Amino acid sequence: MQDNFYYSEEKLLFDNEVKVNYRIAKVLFYIAVTVIPLVIVLQLLGVFIYYMVDAIMAIVTAFILLIMPRILTIVHVHKKKWFKYILLFLVIMMLPLIYLEYDYMVLILWIFPLLISCMYFSNRLNTITVIFDVVVLGFTSYYRSYQRLQNNLISQRIGGLFKDFIISYITYAMLVMISYVIIYLLTKKTNELLQDAIKKKEFEILSITDSMTGIYNYRYLMSELEKNQELFHKENIPFAAVLFDVDHFKSINDTYGHVEGDCALQAIVKCLQNMVRENDVIGRYGGEEFMVILSDTTVNEAYMIAEKCRQAISRLKIENLDTYISISGGVAEYNGENIKDYIRSMDEKMYDAKNNGRNIIIA
């Protein structure tokens, strides 16, 4: 069963963001469980100049910050619009912990948030990331200079502290911003291609969508029937379809008006969507006729689903209508004939239902 296909550019971009959120969270988790233990081993082997006791808290905290996004994906927080900001916040706040312990050896890590940000193809997010990255880097650089002053590595004078901070901060900040410009230029073309792909997808969705009901149109139904026909001939996978027609719909339009008639069709569509299975395809065949295509389904199974739909619609109370609506339907299983003949068989059964008193399903 498909959702209403009124997609916007923002919705399509967000669908892409959700996938990026999940993948980045997984990458950060893998970094945490591989790189962090490697750093601890190297620390124990004496590769770094600091003792383990000096760095253990920073390493453990960085580990927790890196695995946090993956933990949040378990409860599907990555599907929220604000998740990318939380993700970048955790990554940027992890950097001072490592940098203060290992200084110049991990200076390149300040570019890491920019690499993540550029994967979202959002100039606004990139700008926020650069600003936040540079601000945190400023506080970290000052604290680093203060540490150097305490360790008598720079002059005790205030000017010495300030000079050391300014030189290091400007150097590091320039590195971050230059890196951002390079990354931006490299991803600009990709961003343009993504926007073009989104617009193409929008046009594609509009071309297969019925504008009034929001479900698939005749064009998509035909392509879906052909796809199932191909699977039937190649892999012998059965399928069936149901053709529904709303009973006495002309009298509804004549009595209540076309606006109420459209509302009635929309209510029927919503009811059908709630009755069929997730993978079933619903489309508007034309006028007040709807088709449901049921993949990997026999005629008996299709009849049961169609009967459930008929019963649900017969109980449907539609606002502003003081009468109940019913549908008649014809069910047919595909047996290898051409598509036109297959549709004709459904159509004949549907008219048999009409001629036998309406509000029934014939298979």
Image (spheres, grey):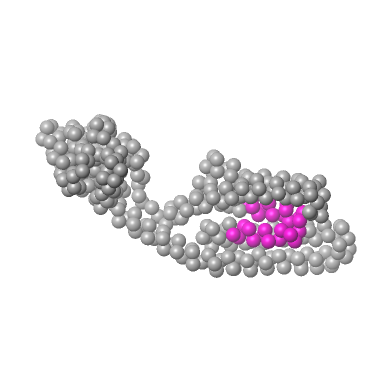
| Lateral position of residue 99 relative to residue 343, left or right | right
Q: Give the residue displayed 41% in from the left and 59% down from the top.
A: 198
| Lateral position of residue 333 relative to residue 197, left or right | left
Q: Give the residue displayed 52% in from the left and 42% down from the top.
A: 76
Vertically, is 296 above or below 100? Answer: above
Near-viewer residue (178 or 11)? 178
Dominant secondary structure of the residues highlighted in magenta in the image: helix
Q: Quadrant of the N terminus?
A: top left
Q: Position of residue 238 (x, y in %)?
A: 27, 39
Q: Position of residue 255 (x, y in %)?
A: 17, 42
Q: Which residues are magenta?
A: 89-115
Vertically, is 53 above or below 159? Answer: above
Near-viewer residue (216 or 166)? 216
Q: Position of residue 50 (x, y in %)?
A: 81, 52
Q: Give the residue displayed 46% in from the left and 51% down from the top.
A: 15
Vertically, is 359 above or below 201? Answer: above
Residue 106 colored in magenta in the image: yes
Image quadrant assignment for residue 142 = bottom right
Image quadrant assignment for residue 116 = bottom right
| Lateral position of residue 133 relative to residue 11, left or right | right
Whether residue 345 is visible to the viewer of this picture, yes or no, is: yes
Near-viewer residue (237 or 244)? 237
Whether residue 248 is visible to the viewer of this picture, yes or no, is: no
Q: Position of residue 275 (x, y in %)?
A: 31, 35
Q: Give the residue displayed 51% in from the left and 66% down from the top.
A: 188
Q: Quadrant of the C terminus?
A: top left
Residue 8 colored in magenta in the image: no
| Lateral position of residue 257 relative to residue 297, left or right | left
